[in-house]
Image (cartoon, helix red, strand yellow):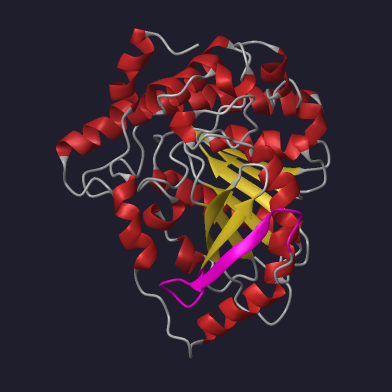
Amino acid sequence: MRVTKKSRQLKALIGATTATVAALPAFFGAGVASAETPAQNDADRIEASAQANGGTELVSATPGNASNKMRLVVRSESMGRDIPFEVIRPADTSKPAPTLYLLNGAGGGEDSASWQLRTDMATFFKDKQVNVITPMQGAFSYYTDWQRPEEALHGVNRWETFLTEELPPVIDSALGTTGVNALAGISTSGTSVFNLAIAKPGLYEAVGAYSGCASTMEPAGQTYIQIVIGARGDADVENMWGPIGSEDWIKHDPIINADKLRGTDIYLSSATGLPGPHDTLDSEGINGSIPRLAERVIVGGIIEAATNECSLRMARRLADLQIPAVVDFKPAGTHSWGYWEDDLHNSWPMLAASMNTPA
């Protein structure tokens, strides 16, 4: 079932991404280190150490455009294609470090709306003893296992299988990790991180959900998913979990299944949607543009107000179940990168403690 004409019209309101995949070659191709650099030596060690997990294997490791950045390509057996990753390596690569899997939002890093391009993550993690792994694919997929292939979204999508079963052993062997993991995501991935943790208890010590909507069974949550997949992704929403409200939708509602998060450290954040400190003419991404500011305040405000309600419901559910969580509900703020950068900084002490690495 595809979304209605009304839902498609919301595509303009929710907003298309500000750049296209055409910008990625320059992003992925710039600043590769020479063969004599420590970064290249690290890449060589990674390729030599990587062990395949069935048909899932490391295809390549290359230095990025900074000394602590790496680009990996991993072949997924279940999806039958190569998946690119941006990686930040630990401050000290000579000893094992834990892994933070950091997911992009709806665009999956296939556009300009990525952690790498919109935040200070490279400098923030430069002195941290952690591997930060971000898939640069998965647009509008919710990083879940789809029931049927979807041509608009690369065909077969088995992200839950890939991220929880196939990928971790390859990453652990290639990067020499401690085997300890955490997971964080924004917006649509604020749903995904909970579902991935529920699907594989014990894989992630901690979860960070920033401005996400954990509800898939309430009308507001279902409408949000339809807008993301149908109106923005131009895909058939029922190819994901079947008919809306069916068994697979129930299975992927983190509020309903919250008890399965017991034992996982949780950081949950959102804002009211009212204009906040990152919603000014001189804010990053606005650059003095009144139309851009208006879009952020209006569209970003509407989206954040909706995800805030979802987050509040998730917080109440966790409290009812007596599952501890660190919650950060801001009095003002829109659905935008300045606040997610703040969320990453603010949640890091909890994530680091969960992974037993210095903050």
Residue 27 position by quadrant: bottom left
Whether the magenta-drawn stretch holds residue 249 is answered as no
User: Bounds of the magenta span?
Assistant: 52-70
Residue at left offset 67%, top offset 48%: 77
Q: Camera-side residue: 334 or 110?
A: 110
Q: In this view, does 219 lie above or below 74?
A: above
Whether the magenta-drawn stretch holds residue 61 is answered as yes
Left or right: residue 281 versus residue 135 is left
Q: Camera-side residue: 239 or 125?
A: 239
Left or right: residue 275 versus residue 85 is left
Q: Camera-side residue: 315 or 211?
A: 211
Q: Is residue 229 above or below residue 345?
A: above
Residue 328 position by quadrant: top right
Residue at left offset 82%, top offset 36%: 262
Location of residue 157 in the rendering, given as x and y in whole percent from the top left corner: 59, 35
Labels in figure, total? 0
Location of residue 296 in the rendering, given as x and y in whole percent from the top left corner: 30, 34
Location of residue 70 in the rendering, given as x and y in whole percent from the top left corner: 52, 69
Q: Answer yes or no: is residue 272 visible.
A: no
Q: Answer yes or no: is residue 12 visible.
A: yes
Q: Camera-side residue: 56 or 358?
A: 56
Residue at left offset 49%, top offset 19%: 236
Location of residue 249 in the rendering, given as x and y in whole percent from the top left corner: 66, 18
Q: In this view, does 357 lie above or below 269?
A: below
Image quadrant for the C terminus?
A: bottom right
